[in-house]
Image (cartoon, grey):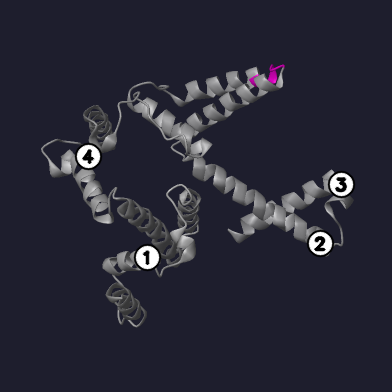
Protein backbone atom coordinates (compact mmCIF):
# COMPACT_ATOMS: atom_id res chain seq x y z
CA UNK A 1 0.00 0.00 0.00
CA UNK A 2 2.88 2.35 0.85
CA UNK A 3 4.37 1.84 -2.64
CA UNK A 4 1.00 2.47 -4.26
CA UNK A 5 0.55 5.69 -2.28
CA UNK A 6 4.05 6.80 -3.29
CA UNK A 7 3.22 6.34 -6.96
CA UNK A 8 -0.08 8.20 -6.59
CA UNK A 9 1.74 11.09 -4.94
CA UNK A 10 4.30 11.18 -7.75
CA UNK A 11 1.52 11.26 -10.34
CA UNK A 12 -0.19 14.16 -8.56
CA UNK A 13 3.09 16.07 -8.33
CA UNK A 14 3.73 15.63 -12.03
CA UNK A 15 0.23 16.70 -13.05
CA UNK A 16 0.23 19.93 -11.00
CA UNK A 17 3.93 20.73 -11.43
CA UNK A 18 4.72 24.40 -11.91
CA UNK A 19 7.57 25.41 -14.17
CA UNK A 20 9.46 23.31 -16.66
CA UNK A 21 9.68 19.55 -16.48
CA UNK A 22 13.19 18.10 -16.16
CA UNK A 23 15.23 15.12 -17.28
CA UNK A 24 14.51 13.53 -13.90
CA UNK A 25 10.76 14.03 -14.42
CA UNK A 26 10.95 12.21 -17.76
CA UNK A 27 12.57 9.21 -16.11
CA UNK A 28 9.90 9.16 -13.40
CA UNK A 29 7.12 9.39 -16.02
CA UNK A 30 8.59 6.43 -17.89
CA UNK A 31 8.89 4.33 -14.75
CA UNK A 32 5.25 5.09 -13.86
CA UNK A 33 4.05 4.19 -17.37
CA UNK A 34 5.72 0.80 -17.09
CA UNK A 35 4.76 0.33 -13.44
CA UNK A 36 1.84 -1.63 -11.92
CA UNK A 37 -0.63 1.23 -12.38
CA UNK A 38 0.82 2.33 -15.69
CA UNK A 39 -0.30 2.16 -19.32
CA UNK A 40 -1.42 -1.31 -20.56
CA UNK A 41 -0.03 -0.66 -24.06
CA UNK A 42 3.35 0.53 -22.78
CA UNK A 43 3.67 -2.50 -20.51
CA UNK A 44 3.14 -4.85 -23.46
CA UNK A 45 6.09 -3.45 -25.40
CA UNK A 46 9.56 -4.91 -25.92
CA UNK A 47 12.75 -3.73 -27.61
CA UNK A 48 11.63 -5.61 -30.71
CA UNK A 49 8.08 -4.21 -30.82
CA UNK A 50 9.40 -0.65 -30.44
CA UNK A 51 11.77 -0.88 -33.43
CA UNK A 52 9.26 0.56 -35.89
CA UNK A 53 8.42 3.51 -33.64
CA UNK A 54 12.06 4.47 -33.19
CA UNK A 55 12.50 4.44 -36.97
CA UNK A 56 9.32 6.44 -37.55
CA UNK A 57 10.31 9.07 -35.00
CA UNK A 58 13.75 9.45 -36.59
CA UNK A 59 12.19 10.03 -40.00
CA UNK A 60 9.83 12.61 -38.53
CA UNK A 61 12.87 14.44 -37.15
CA UNK A 62 14.32 14.45 -40.67
CA UNK A 63 11.04 15.84 -42.06
CA UNK A 64 11.14 18.68 -39.54
CA UNK A 65 14.76 19.45 -40.47
CA UNK A 66 13.94 19.46 -44.19
CA UNK A 67 10.99 21.77 -43.57
CA UNK A 68 13.13 24.02 -41.32
CA UNK A 69 10.30 23.84 -38.80
CA UNK A 70 11.94 24.46 -35.43
CA UNK A 71 8.82 23.96 -33.24
CA UNK A 72 8.24 20.64 -35.00
CA UNK A 73 11.92 19.70 -34.65
CA UNK A 74 11.73 20.36 -30.90
CA UNK A 75 8.66 18.15 -30.66
CA UNK A 76 10.07 15.31 -32.78
CA UNK A 77 13.41 15.28 -30.95
CA UNK A 78 11.39 14.85 -27.77
CA UNK A 79 9.71 11.81 -29.30
CA UNK A 80 13.09 10.30 -30.19
CA UNK A 81 14.34 11.02 -26.66
CA UNK A 82 11.27 9.31 -25.25
CA UNK A 83 12.09 6.21 -27.27
CA UNK A 84 15.61 6.21 -25.82
CA UNK A 85 14.21 6.47 -22.30
CA UNK A 86 11.60 3.79 -23.07
CA UNK A 87 14.24 1.28 -24.21
CA UNK A 88 16.44 2.15 -21.24
CA UNK A 89 13.65 1.59 -18.74
CA UNK A 90 12.84 -1.79 -20.32
CA UNK A 91 16.50 -2.72 -20.02
CA UNK A 92 16.58 -1.58 -16.40
CA UNK A 93 13.65 -3.83 -15.50
CA UNK A 94 15.49 -6.79 -17.06
CA UNK A 95 18.67 -5.92 -15.17
CA UNK A 96 20.64 -5.15 -18.36
CA UNK A 97 21.41 -1.42 -17.97
CA UNK A 98 19.70 1.86 -17.17
CA UNK A 99 19.60 5.36 -18.66
CA UNK A 100 22.50 6.59 -16.54
CA UNK A 101 24.63 3.83 -18.06
CA UNK A 102 23.60 4.99 -21.53
CA UNK A 103 24.65 8.56 -20.74
CA UNK A 104 27.90 7.45 -19.12
CA UNK A 105 28.70 5.21 -22.08
CA UNK A 106 28.16 7.85 -24.75
CA UNK A 107 30.17 10.44 -22.78
CA UNK A 108 33.10 8.04 -22.52
CA UNK A 109 32.79 7.19 -26.22
CA UNK A 110 32.79 10.83 -27.34
CA UNK A 111 35.82 11.64 -25.18
CA UNK A 112 37.62 8.54 -26.44
CA UNK A 113 36.83 9.26 -30.10
CA UNK A 114 37.84 12.93 -29.96
CA UNK A 115 41.49 12.73 -28.89
CA UNK A 116 42.15 15.93 -30.87
CA UNK A 117 39.88 17.73 -28.39
CA UNK A 118 40.24 15.75 -25.14
CA UNK A 119 43.71 14.27 -25.71
CA UNK A 120 47.07 15.02 -27.19
CA UNK A 121 46.42 14.06 -30.82
CA UNK A 122 46.14 16.52 -33.67
CA UNK A 123 43.48 16.78 -36.40
CA UNK A 124 44.00 19.74 -38.69
CA UNK A 125 40.86 19.15 -40.76
CA UNK A 126 37.80 16.95 -41.19
CA UNK A 127 39.81 14.25 -42.97
CA UNK A 128 42.07 14.03 -39.93
CA UNK A 129 39.06 13.74 -37.64
CA UNK A 130 37.62 10.90 -39.72
CA UNK A 131 40.96 9.10 -39.80
CA UNK A 132 41.18 9.24 -36.00
CA UNK A 133 37.54 8.19 -35.63
CA UNK A 134 37.85 5.09 -37.82
CA UNK A 135 41.12 4.06 -36.21
CA UNK A 136 39.63 4.35 -32.72
CA UNK A 137 36.49 2.43 -33.75
CA UNK A 138 38.66 -0.36 -35.15
CA UNK A 139 40.61 -0.51 -31.89
CA UNK A 140 37.37 -0.60 -29.88
CA UNK A 141 36.26 -3.65 -31.86
CA UNK A 142 39.63 -5.28 -31.39
CA UNK A 143 39.43 -4.67 -27.64
CA UNK A 144 35.75 -5.74 -27.46
CA UNK A 145 34.62 -2.44 -25.93
CA UNK A 146 30.81 -2.35 -25.34
CA UNK A 147 30.50 -5.84 -26.74
CA UNK A 148 31.90 -4.84 -30.14
CA UNK A 149 33.11 -7.74 -32.25
CA UNK A 150 35.96 -7.63 -34.77
CA UNK A 151 34.53 -7.12 -38.26
CA UNK A 152 35.72 -6.32 -41.75
CA UNK A 153 37.08 -2.83 -42.37
CA UNK A 154 33.70 -1.79 -43.76
CA UNK A 155 30.94 -2.42 -41.25
CA UNK A 156 27.50 -0.91 -41.87
CA UNK A 157 24.13 -1.77 -40.33
CA UNK A 158 21.95 -3.88 -42.64
CA UNK A 159 18.89 -2.09 -41.24
CA UNK A 160 19.67 1.22 -42.96
CA UNK A 161 17.53 2.31 -45.93
CA UNK A 162 19.13 1.09 -49.16
CA UNK A 163 20.33 4.49 -50.40
CA UNK A 164 21.91 5.40 -47.07
CA UNK A 165 23.34 1.88 -46.77
CA UNK A 166 25.11 2.20 -50.13
CA UNK A 167 26.28 5.72 -49.33
CA UNK A 168 27.88 4.75 -46.03
CA UNK A 169 29.60 1.72 -47.60
CA UNK A 170 31.13 3.98 -50.24
CA UNK A 171 32.21 6.56 -47.67
CA UNK A 172 33.91 3.94 -45.51
CA UNK A 173 35.65 2.39 -48.53
CA UNK A 174 36.90 5.83 -49.52
CA UNK A 175 38.37 6.47 -46.05
CA UNK A 176 40.60 3.41 -46.30
CA UNK A 177 41.80 4.48 -49.76
CA UNK A 178 39.55 2.42 -52.06
CA UNK A 179 37.96 5.05 -54.27
CA UNK A 180 37.86 6.73 -57.66
CA UNK A 181 40.25 9.63 -58.01
CA UNK A 182 38.15 11.92 -60.17
CA UNK A 183 34.49 12.55 -60.91
CA UNK A 184 34.96 11.71 -64.60
CA UNK A 185 35.97 8.16 -63.67
CA UNK A 186 32.62 7.67 -61.97
CA UNK A 187 30.82 9.06 -65.02
CA UNK A 188 32.59 6.51 -67.22
CA UNK A 189 31.62 3.76 -64.79
CA UNK A 190 27.98 4.92 -64.89
CA UNK A 191 27.99 4.88 -68.71
CA UNK A 192 29.39 1.35 -68.61
CA UNK A 193 26.75 0.20 -66.12
CA UNK A 194 23.96 1.69 -68.26
CA UNK A 195 25.20 -0.24 -71.28
CA UNK A 196 25.22 -3.45 -69.23
CA UNK A 197 21.65 -2.74 -68.10
CA UNK A 198 20.51 -2.25 -71.69
CA UNK A 199 22.17 -5.53 -72.65
CA UNK A 200 20.56 -7.52 -69.80
CA UNK A 201 18.58 -10.53 -71.06
CA UNK A 202 16.79 -11.92 -68.00
CA UNK A 203 14.85 -10.37 -65.13
CA UNK A 204 17.65 -11.47 -62.75
CA UNK A 205 20.24 -9.71 -64.89
CA UNK A 206 18.07 -6.59 -65.14
CA UNK A 207 17.72 -6.41 -61.36
CA UNK A 208 21.44 -6.88 -60.81
CA UNK A 209 22.47 -4.34 -63.44
CA UNK A 210 19.90 -1.80 -62.30
CA UNK A 211 21.28 -2.17 -58.78
CA UNK A 212 24.77 -1.47 -60.16
CA UNK A 213 23.47 1.66 -61.91
CA UNK A 214 21.85 2.94 -58.71
CA UNK A 215 24.97 2.17 -56.67
CA UNK A 216 27.10 4.11 -59.16
CA UNK A 217 24.70 7.07 -59.19
CA UNK A 218 24.99 7.23 -55.40
CA UNK A 219 28.76 7.16 -55.77
CA UNK A 220 28.54 10.01 -58.29
CA UNK A 221 26.44 12.03 -55.84
CA UNK A 222 29.24 11.68 -53.30
CA UNK A 223 31.68 13.22 -55.78
CA UNK A 224 29.28 16.12 -56.21
CA UNK A 225 29.20 16.37 -52.39
CA UNK A 226 25.45 15.74 -52.47
CA UNK A 227 23.67 13.59 -49.90
CA UNK A 228 21.90 10.94 -51.99
CA UNK A 229 19.16 10.27 -49.43
CA UNK A 230 18.25 13.98 -49.20
CA UNK A 231 18.50 14.48 -52.97
CA UNK A 232 16.21 11.56 -53.76
CA UNK A 233 13.74 12.52 -51.05
CA UNK A 234 13.67 16.07 -52.43
CA UNK A 235 12.97 14.84 -55.95
CA UNK A 236 10.22 12.54 -54.69
CA UNK A 237 8.56 15.42 -52.81
CA UNK A 238 8.88 17.62 -55.90
CA UNK A 239 7.14 14.93 -57.95
CA UNK A 240 4.30 14.75 -55.42
CA UNK A 241 3.84 18.52 -55.53
CA UNK A 242 3.65 18.55 -59.32
CA UNK A 243 1.39 15.51 -59.36
CA UNK A 244 -1.00 17.22 -56.95
CA UNK A 245 -1.06 20.31 -59.19
CA UNK A 246 -1.98 18.24 -62.26
CA UNK A 247 -4.58 16.26 -60.33
CA UNK A 248 -6.22 19.46 -59.09
CA UNK A 249 -6.22 20.90 -62.61
CA UNK A 250 -7.95 17.76 -63.89
CA UNK A 251 -10.49 17.90 -61.09
CA UNK A 252 -11.33 21.53 -61.88
CA UNK A 253 -11.80 20.58 -65.54
CA UNK A 254 -14.09 17.71 -64.54
CA UNK A 255 -11.70 15.13 -65.92
CA UNK A 256 -9.93 12.02 -64.64
CA UNK A 257 -6.52 10.70 -65.56
CA UNK A 258 -8.11 8.33 -68.08
CA UNK A 259 -9.84 11.27 -69.81
CA UNK A 260 -6.53 13.06 -70.31
CA UNK A 261 -4.15 12.24 -73.16
CA UNK A 262 -0.40 11.93 -72.63
CA UNK A 263 0.06 15.24 -74.43
CA UNK A 264 -2.41 16.97 -72.09
CA UNK A 265 -0.76 15.42 -69.06
CA UNK A 266 2.65 16.66 -70.21
CA UNK A 267 1.21 20.13 -70.83
CA UNK A 268 -0.18 20.28 -67.31
CA UNK A 269 3.07 18.92 -65.93
CA UNK A 270 5.00 21.76 -67.58
CA UNK A 271 2.54 24.24 -66.05
CA UNK A 272 3.21 22.65 -62.65
CA UNK A 273 6.95 23.16 -63.15
CA UNK A 274 6.44 26.80 -64.09
CA UNK A 275 4.18 27.34 -61.09
CA UNK A 276 6.88 25.78 -58.91
CA UNK A 277 9.45 28.30 -60.16
CA UNK A 278 7.08 31.20 -59.53
CA UNK A 279 6.48 30.03 -55.96
CA UNK A 280 10.24 29.86 -55.35
Image x and y of residue 187, in percent: 53, 24
| Left or right of residue 53: residue 18 | left
- Looking at the image, tell me whether mark 2 or mark 4 is earlier in sequence order: 4
Q: Which residues are magenta?
A: 197-201
Residue 249 drawn above or below residue 32: above
Image x and y of residue 40, in percent: 48, 64
| Left or right of residue 29: residue 133 | left
Q: Nearer the viewer, residue 39 or 153?
A: 39
Q: Nearer the viewer, residue 123 or 8?
A: 8
- Looking at the image, tell me whether mark 3 or mark 4 is earlier in sequence order: 4
**Mark 1 in CB contact with mark 3 (< 8 angstroms):** no
Disc 2/disc 4 C-alpha distance (Å):
57 Å
The residue furthest left is 120
Label number found at residue 261: 3
Q: Residues within 10 Å of mark 2 (few under 14, many from 20)?
A: few
SS class, disc 3 = loop
Residue 14 drawn above or below residue 253: below
Which residue position is annotated with label 4? 113
Which residue position is annotated with label 2? 251
Q: Residues within 10 Å of mark 4 (few under 14, many from 20)?
A: many
Disc 1/disc 4 C-alpha distance (Å):
37 Å
**Mark 2 in CB contact with mark 1 (< 8 angstroms):** no
**Image-quadrant location for residue 2:** bottom left
Tell me the quarter of the image containing the N terminus: bottom left
Q: Is residue 238 magenta?
A: no
Disc 1/disc 3 C-alpha distance (Å):
62 Å
* Secondary structure predominantly adopted by residues drawn in magenta: loop
Amino acid sequence: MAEKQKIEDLVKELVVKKGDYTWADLQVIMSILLGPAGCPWDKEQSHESLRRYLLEECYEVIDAIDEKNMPSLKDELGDVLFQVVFHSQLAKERGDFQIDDVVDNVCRKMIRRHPHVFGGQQAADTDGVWANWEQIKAQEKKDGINGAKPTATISVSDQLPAVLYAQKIQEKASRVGFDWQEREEVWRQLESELLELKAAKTSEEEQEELGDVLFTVINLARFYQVDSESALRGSAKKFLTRFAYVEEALREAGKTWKDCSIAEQNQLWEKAKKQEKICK
